[in-house]
Image: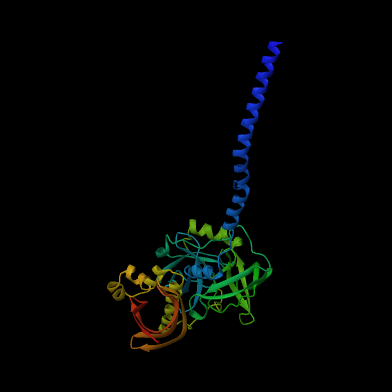
Amino acid sequence: MNVRWFISIIMTIIVISGGIIGYYHIKNSVPAQLTAPSKLYLESEVVEKENVPQALKEIIFESQKLVVKIELADGSFGSGFLYNDKGDVITNAHVVANAKDVKVTSADSKELTGEVIGISIDTDIAVVRVPELEGTTPFKLAETRKAELGDDVIALGSPLGLQNTVTTGIISGVGREFEIDSFKYEDVFQISAPIAPGNSGGPLIDTKSGEVVGINSATMDQGVIGFSIPLVNVMPMVESWSESPMESLPSIGANTTGNSAGETSTNVDIAEYLVNYFYESINYRDYVTAYSLLGSSWQSKTVYEDFRAGYLDFLTIEVDDLLTKQNGNNVEVVTVITAQERSEKGVSYKKFKVTFELGLENDQMKILSEKRESME
């Protein structure tokens, strides 16, 4: 009897102890589990952030840096874009037909030397190597994904010799086939983005991903309808030339009417373009690019840190008016701008008249000086 009583007491103590332990476990652990972040939710959030499309303006600004103008000795020209870190530029075969060495002009108006290292006689594709662009981060490429009907795209190039002109549109047709001269265009995109002479060889870019999906190559109906070669169709050929450049280039009998011989841009055109590019760089806080556009005299008087500090308080700059005129060997560009400026008192808008002097340094157009006057 005493033994049974003793066992009952022991069992009761065990049950009560277990209940107390269980209570505190539930009290402390379960709420923590209920309020802990869901691992699945966090992983999904990261994926969503990674897939958020870049702003269209940012895609355009970054893309313009990698688009070049390609010019031949006879004055004809076209476009091209950097596709790898070797300094290799994709363009159209008809742009560089029967040429070995070409002049390449970068977005900052720097003139470089390029060499054709690969060209097809029936597909309108060629590759130009520009040693000075080696090591530059190239375009993102849609190497395995083909764009689809209805996709929004932008076409970049140098129409009429004016660098970095952008047109927008959609892929309005796929699988188009036709022939121009010796070139066969098979399975190409039809695009609604207007294409002018000189755009040939420029990139067709997906507006959502910022990736190159095609090479702008041909046009009809006075540029209203354009055609672009899908990048995925020619990448094996392009990469083979980059790995093993052609020792001798084939002769091509193509009529290069896709280019605009003789309609090259003047120093006034280039000066106007550079000033707009300067302000565009400031607006995107790319002070390094803006500083690189300055002449050596200005740079010697103003170190980069001071130049950058002079623009940090400008949130945006809008060009209201721009006038250019030849001033001896130089070009004078007068702009009227509205600057959104921040200060201790808050944000305000101010108007300025800014006069730039531009001229050639080592055959490259540079911004030599700037004079800023308040209009208030």
In the image, 324: left or right of 149? left
Residue 178, image x and y in percent?
66, 72
Q: Is residue 205 visible?
A: yes
- Which residue sits at x=34%, y=72%? 307
- Which residue sits at x=33%, y=75%? 295
- Which residue sits at x=36%, y=78%? 367
Q: In the figure, 247 relative to 366: above or below?
A: above
Residue 247, image x and y in percent?
46, 60
Task: Out of 258 and 376, give the one closest to the viewer.
Answer: 376
**Which of the 4 quarters of the picture holds residue 327?**
bottom left
Residue 74, image x and y in percent?
46, 79
The C terminus: image quadrant: bottom left
**Which of the 4 quarters of the picture holds residue 167?**
bottom right
Task: Out of 363 and 254, give the one closest to the viewer.
Answer: 363
Q: How is the image coloured?
A: rainbow
Q: Is residue 73 visible?
A: no
Residue 189, image x and y in percent?
65, 69
Task: Out of 74 and 146, give the one closest to the viewer.
Answer: 146
**Which of the 4 quarters of the picture holds residue 332?**
bottom left
In the image, 108: left or right of 302? right
The N terminus: image quadrant: top right
Q: What is the count of numbered marks?
A: 0
In the image, 190: left or right of 254? right
- Which residue sits at x=63%, y=34%? 23
Task: Out of 324 and 173, give the one closest to the viewer.
Answer: 324
